[in-house]
């Protein structure tokens, strides 16, 4: 399965402060396509159409993982925002760190398994059935 | 006390929140000195703005309404600590996962945001330094303690000893602030530096003012809270009725809180924790289940339905479990001994070691203890770690 890098270019996050043409051509040399997406967090829906294995380069996985992940997806996260753009000032150092973070994520991707099923059912089902049960019982008499 | 509120828009990831209405709502509050709306509170610019906001307005207690505390909570805590505000006077309100993402409908989102902010403000208003904030352990109000010794019996870490005066003494080196003693104390006189029953009571009182029916309160342990966050990202309509209170462990919920919640008119109470032996605090979930069973009997004696209080665990298999290669496993049962969650057992029928996927927390203790190397973790395998080291060396990252 070919790999793709989805690069989040965001002015607010500062991830646009990089020579993207150079970054693209650097990865093109090793046959990896880099797709840039402006403010990925609000434009992530196209991901459902991408069939390739993906490295997402942008913010930390904690922030966005649950929001974008879906079934049959193989994705790894390169936290370039916190670890590169917010950490360093020098553009050349940032560039090197971004390359390294993406390479590390590509390496992790090799060992990653597909998300077979995203767990959603149990919690929602349990909550719904409990709310239904409490509705059947009626309001707490102490309320009155 | 001067209270400030910071609202984070999370880079437009919460477009269904009516920020203007939320700000208007907060401006009407007498106890709120000032409000700051930020595009991204965690960014370097956002962090500077938070510090300036605190210093300029002489804020000494702060509410940050943003993403889940499990995401950027640590950052906000360290940031606020820099300005001299202790962790106890910072309240992080999870409006991203639990309101904006879970509910989606703007009206429900706004209602829920308001309830959550009210709960946070009320909690802060009840927060008092009893001189124990700097002591990193549970503490007892001995003026009210009746020396029943239950805390000594129940402490999962044996951190409590009987003092010569008959009162319990807490060993700070052993206490992990799990709150099992807080949950078990019949007098409700034990507290943690950031978990006092009076504060939680304040939150419950505030939640009970909501007109949503049925109105449910959920006490969620960190593990259940993490699972809830994951589910909320894909929508969780049930949260319109449910107000979540984060607790250190399901075993830390004192039944006094349950009684108070029911007496203020809460229709149902969920205590959400781990299943099986998953409890990292050890035994917290077992104690919670026992206490709930006892309390349910009491509720029935009071002619209240026992379903008004339940224990919930989600078993989402959110954390992947370790895997055993049965071809190379010699069934030495070493893994069974070392597993801290008792998730590995020997199956006589199958003549092999079996991992309970719900009990396994993928800590890796079994993998490193296996003499034949038959246990693998789904992520972070030896191969992966070694290839990462190789890559770093190729890139010139080595000790100089």
Image (cartoon, coloured by chain):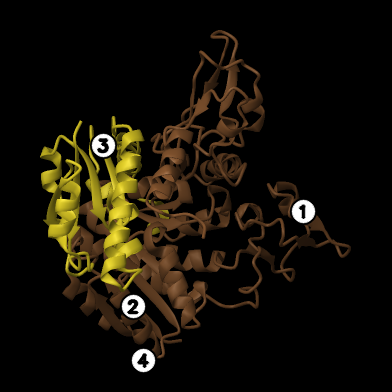
Chain colours: A yellow, B brown
Q: Which is more foreground, mark 4 or mark 2?
A: 4
Label 1, label 3: how far apart the Cα atoms are: 53 Å
Q: Which residue is labeled 4 in the image?
A: B56
Coordinates of residue A30 in the picture (x, y in percent): 20, 42
Task: State the residue at coordinates (54%, 16%).
Answer: B328
Q: Which residue is labeled 2 in the image?
A: B5
To which chain does the residue with label 3 belong? A
Label whose residue precedes the other's in the sequence (4 or 2): 2
Label whose residue precedes the other's in the sequence (4 or 1): 4
Pointer 1 and pointer 2 on the same chain = yes
Q: Which residue is labeled 1 in the image?
A: B149
To which chain does the residue with label 4 belong? B
- CB under 8 Å between discs 3 and 4: no
Q: Secondary structure at mark 3?
A: loop
Q: Which is more foreground, mark 3 or mark 4?
A: 3
- Observer-nearest residue: B187 or B172? B172
């Amino acid at each position: 399965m070919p790999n793709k890098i989805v690069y989040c270019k965001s002015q607010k996050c500062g991830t646009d402060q990089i020579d993207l043409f150079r970054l693209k051509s650097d990865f093109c040399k090793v046959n990896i396509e880099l797709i840039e997406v402006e403010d990925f967090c609000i434009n992530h829906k196209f991901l459902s159409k991408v069939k390739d294995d993906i490295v997402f380069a942008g913010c930390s996985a904690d922030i966005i993982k649950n929001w974008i992940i879906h079934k049959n997806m193989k994705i790894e996260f390169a936290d370039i925002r916190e670890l590169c753009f917010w950490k360093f000032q020098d553009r050349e150092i940032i560039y090197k760190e971004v390359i390294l973070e993406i390479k590390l994520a590509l390496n992790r991707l090799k060992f990653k398994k597909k998300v077979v099923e995203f767990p959603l059912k149990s919690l929602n089902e349990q909550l719904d059935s409990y709310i239904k049960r409490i509705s059947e019982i009626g309001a707490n008499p102490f309320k009155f | 006390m001067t209270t400030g509120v910071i609202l984070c828009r999370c880079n437009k990831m919460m477009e269904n929140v009516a920020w203007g209405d939320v700000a208007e709502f907060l401006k009407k509050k007498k106890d709120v000195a000032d409000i700051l709306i930020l595009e991204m509170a965690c960014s370097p610019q956002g962090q500077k703005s938070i510090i300036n906001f605190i210093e300029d307005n002489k804020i000494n207690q702060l509410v940050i309404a943003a993403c889940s505390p499990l995401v950027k909570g640590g950052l906000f805590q360290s940031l606020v600590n820099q300005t001299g505000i202790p962790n106890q006077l910072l309240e992080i309100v999870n409006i991203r996962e639990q309101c904006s993402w879970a509910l989606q409908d703007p009206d429900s989102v706004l209602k829920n945001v308001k309830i959550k902010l009210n709960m946070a403000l009320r909690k802060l208003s009840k927060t008092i330094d009893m001189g124990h904030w700097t002591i990193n352990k549970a503490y007892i109000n001995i003026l009210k303690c009746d020396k029943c010794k239950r805390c000594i019996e129940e402490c999962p870490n044996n951190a409590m000893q009987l003092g010569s005066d008959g009162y319990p003494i807490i060993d700070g080196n052993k206490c992990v602030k799990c709150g099992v003693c807080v949950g078990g104390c019949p007098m409700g006189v034990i507290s943690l530096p950031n978990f006092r029953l009076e504060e939680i009571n304040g939150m419950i009182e505030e939640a009970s003012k909501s007109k949503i029916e049925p109105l449910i309160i959920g006490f969620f342990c960190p593990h259940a809270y993490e699972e809830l966050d994951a589910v909320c990202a894909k929508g969780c309509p049930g949260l319109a009725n449910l107000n979540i209170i984060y607790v250190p462990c399901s075993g830390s919920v004192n039944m006094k809180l349950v009684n108070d919640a029911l007496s203020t008119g809460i229709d149902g109470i969920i205590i959400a924790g781990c299943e099986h032996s998953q409890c990292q605090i050890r035994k917290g979930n077992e104690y919670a289940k026992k206490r709930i069973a006892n309390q349910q009997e009491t509720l029935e004696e009071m002619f209240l339905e026992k379903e008004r209080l339940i224990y919930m665990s989600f078993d989402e298999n959110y954390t992947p479990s370790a895997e055993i290669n049965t071809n190379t496993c010699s069934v030495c049962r070493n893994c069974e001994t070392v597993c801290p969650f008792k998730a590995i057992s020997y199956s006589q029928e199958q003549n092999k070691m079996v991992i309970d996927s719900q009990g396994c927390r993928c800590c890796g203790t079994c993998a490193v203890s296996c003499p034949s190397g038959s246990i693998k973790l789904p992520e972070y395998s030896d191969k992966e770690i070694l290839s990462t080291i190789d890559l770093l060396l190729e890139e010139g990252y080595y000790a100089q």
